[in-house]
Image (spheres, grey):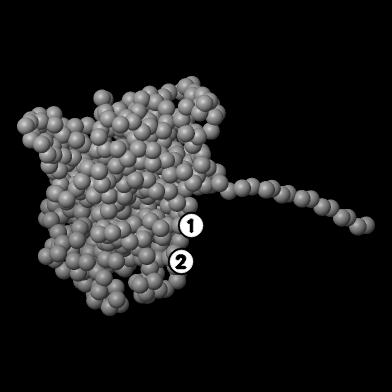
Amino acid sequence: QAFNQRAINDRIRENIPGGRVHDYYNRDTENKDVFVENYGNVPLMARIRLSEFMEKRSTGDTDFTPIVNGTIRDQVDTWTVMRPSETNLNTRVGDSAAFNTYSNLTFGWSRSGQDAPWFMPTFNRDNQDLMTAAAGHARDWVTSTATDGVTDGATHPGDGTDAYWSSGDSFDNSGPVWPGEEVTHDAAQNLQQERAPMTISQWAALPNNLKVGNFWVIDHQTGWAYWANQLQAGETTSYLLDAAQMTAAANNIPGEYYYGIHVDGQLISPDRINDFLAADGSFTHHDDLSDFLTAVQNGSIDNNWGNPGPEENVQPDQINFSIMAPGTIFTMAGEQYRYLENMSSGNHLIIRNDSFLGEGVFQQDNRLNTWYAALDPAVQAMTQPVADSFDTGVVADADIVWEGQNRWLTANLHAFPEVEADTTQVDPSGTPRAFALSLADVVRLSGPGRAFTDFSNRATDQGENDGWLLRTPSVVSGHRVWLVGSSLHNLQGQLSGAGYGTGPAAPNRGVRPAIIVHQ
């Protein structure tokens, strides 16, 4: 018998990119909502940069004086780029610091117990049109370049007040009333922000599995704010800005002042990230921007993407630590490691994947030193200094209260502040060397999205003999230290300070060296 079966599956689809920056502003209430809508049918990547200008004139004076020298009200390109400090979006730095006295910017949108806000989708779906959706007292730059604080230039319905649109609202643009299609749109909802806007340095410190999502990241060196996810068709970002409020110092100026914010929005398709990496005048992109954009382009930071597999023995320059997820296993210069943590500033905490069994607390320091001395010179060259000795504190096993699963996380380490404070950090006054982790290190590295997600991967992969010693003592005098328990006694991955680490070495536990490397 013969059988002949056929089928056709086909489609024709036009990919239409389209995005619009929304700016809802009301000078009476000082509400200012800035966000980006993707009205097309393909993903986009988005960034926004804010520039500020202010000048004041005392009573009786003829001329205004700008608060930043060289800036001119009618020349927006001279306005001062808003650049926050590396650790606090609410504090401007450089020339931008002049505005701290007079204006407070509220980044992100957060209301206790409320879902994301609502907006009116743009009627202007011409992707060659550079107009923004400016509502209320906001003025689109294409339709009005006036800087007198009075002239209108809105291109979108609404009065710019907070929560102007809500569920069930609609607007008929027949006429048209506003630029764009003569259709009726229903109000739609912004994406809920997953975390507050942050600087790119703060982003770099996030666990890799949290680095892509619905939130804004600001490169504090250039002022560009990037949406940390691909903006899918029909999606609209959360607010980058929620308010721009003048301070008491501005309201007490004896005379008059002018204050303005310029919003510059740029949208690209995800295959064009080099456009966002292009030279930017006198500004220098942050070192982590390329990794950030690549993560957004790929939709995630995969611990295998761009890095060799766990068994592939490579040199340090063949590894990109900044994209590693906590818990990743890799082999570097003949040693296999587990990646523990991105410590920011290019520093990364890693630990040998196995321990040296049969060596106890008496042998620990010697084993750490001899192991480090034998490392490949390329690894030693990237090893960061740590303190020459640690202030470990002491805590007895019986004094610890356990949180959740027995002997997984401590609930009362704060009651022993010296022990809690003993977390390994780079110390420029110390020595590049190997070390044992502290009890506090292991606790903070344990949990979802961290290096140790369960008991089994907190232990080493050495069968029943998978326990290892920490550096934190469990007795005031003597040689007992905390350790990660072994499977031999059904204690796999559990933390214990009861009767361990003393006397002769035990075959089921050993010394597990860790180092901090810089890349």
Depth order, front residue of 338/74: 74
Q: Quadrant of the C terminus?
A: bottom left
Local packing at callout 1 (Cα closer than 10 Å; few below 14, some 14-19, many 20+) is few
Residue for point 49% across, 23% down: 170
Mark 2 highlights which residue? 309
Q: Specify the quadrant of the image occupied by residue 406.
A: top left
What kind of element bears circle 2?
Answer: loop
Mark 1 highlights which residue? 271
Three-letter amino acid code at disc 2?
Gly
Where residue 75 appears, x then y in whole percent? 26, 47
Q: Is residue 165 something that shows in the picture?
A: yes
Q: Is residue 243 above or below residue 372?
A: above
Where residue 385 appears, x then y in whole percent? 18, 66
Depth order, front residue of 68/345: 68
Left or right: residue 95 versus residue 464 is left
Where residue 210 appears, x then y in whole percent? 38, 47
Three-letter amino acid code at disc 1?
Asp
